[in-house]
Amino acid sequence: MNCSEKKIITYFIVAFLGFCMVACIKPTKQENNILLPVKPVYDSVLKVHDDALNVILVSDWGRNGFYNQREVAEKMAEVASSAGTEFFISCGDNFQVNGVQSVNDPLWRINFEDIYVHPSLQKDWYPVLGNHDYHGNTQALIDYSHVSRRWKMPARFYTKTKKLTITTPILFIFLDTPPLINSYYEEPEEYPDVETQDSLKQMKWLKTVLNSSTEQWKIAIGHHPVYSASTKHGNTHELIAKFSPLFEKYKVDAYFSGHDHDFQHLKPKGSYTDYFVTGTGSAVRESSTDENSVFSMSAPGFTYLSVSGNELKINFIDKEGNIVYTYTKAK
């Protein structure tokens, strides 16, 4: 064997060994094989302060008990029983796939009353409307407030204020996002109620609410994400233009949404507001990340929000009761 042949053989051996070493290195990934920008942080057990306001948020849940809806509801009941909750928030798409037709629609029983049946789930529910709700009669979701003791939807957009103490009020702002998104006007037969809404009136109302707010904590809720890394829907550009400047100007602490069927925490560079997606109340989709992502995971579940005098804490909890992500925002 001459010198040239030895060099060629040596080259191939080195290249082969290098390939083997690279192949053996596995990046840290989520269960859904989505590479995260940071290692997930979470509490091993749910930690609740005695002086905190605790709320459970769930979204995209109305599937007749199927696609994990019943399992998520059962775990919500367990957490509400053990850790407590003041009330529940639904981030929309309350009735998949075509909304409800009236307050007497059987889906109220099949999708809601017979699913969230545990005594710990009988506290007040504060919902917003999603795009699937707009397939049906959206006024029926408001009118059901006069039928149900626990369903509390006074209008399409509204506020609720809770006080931890005299000096620590919390403002919850409930928004109607479908009429703020251009694409829904292109399908009037699919979303008949969208065209009847006054989106300018809602935005004027939101500016007035924020301008006059003096609460220590401001939390906004809408169905559509402002920011999202999901490959299904992703960022809602109309809401980035409409909401983000107001949220920054008036220091809205957090915005919660659904629509994309995964858990997400996003925070654009320099943003004061934290954006959370919790569209995991039943069927989920593959998750993804982008430059704004702090956390992303595809798993059925719900969000446990705890607000005290000087901190806001969220826990993403899956249908098995595992805390998959914890985030704390201090003031």
Image (spheres, helix red, strand yellow):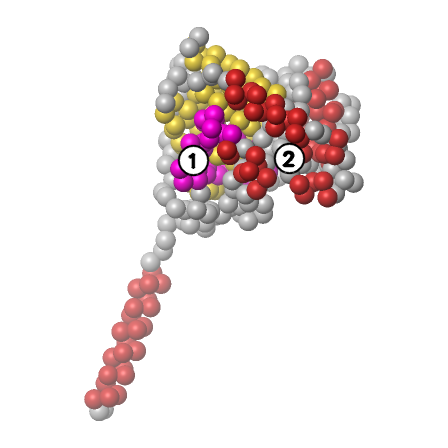
Q: Write down the residue under mark 2.
A: 180
User: Residue at coordinates 69% horizontally, 18% vertically from top-left?
Assistant: 145
Judged from the image, the secondary structure of the residue bearing numbered disc 2 is: helix
Give the magenta range: 246-274
User: Residue at coordinates 27% horizontally, 74% vertically from top-left?
Assistant: 14
Relative to 241, residue 75 above or below: above
From where the camera sits, is residue 3 visible?
yes
Measured from the top left, where is residue 166 in percent x and y?
44, 8
Q: Nearer the viewer, residue 60 or 242?
A: 242
Residue 271 on the magenta segment = yes
Q: Callout 1, which amino acid?
A: Ser
Query: The N terminus is located in which quarter?
Result: bottom left
Q: Write down the residue under mark 1.
A: 271
Judged from the image, the secondary structure of the residue bearing numbered disc 1 is: loop
Around disc 1, counting alpha carbons within 10 Å, would you say few (fewer than 14), some (14 to 19), or many (20 or more)?
A: some
Around disc 2, counting alpha carbons within 10 Å, would you say few (fewer than 14), some (14 to 19), or many (20 or more)?
A: many
Q: Nearer the viewer, residue 238 or 193?
A: 238
User: Residue at coordinates 24% horizontally, 83% vertically from top-left?
Assistant: 7
Residue 33 on the magenta segment = no
Relative to 179, residue 125 above or below: above
Measured from the top left, where is residue 54 in percent x and y?
47, 20
User: Residue at coordinates 67% horizontally, 43% vertically from top-left?
Assistant: 183
Q: Quadrant of residue 188?
A: top right
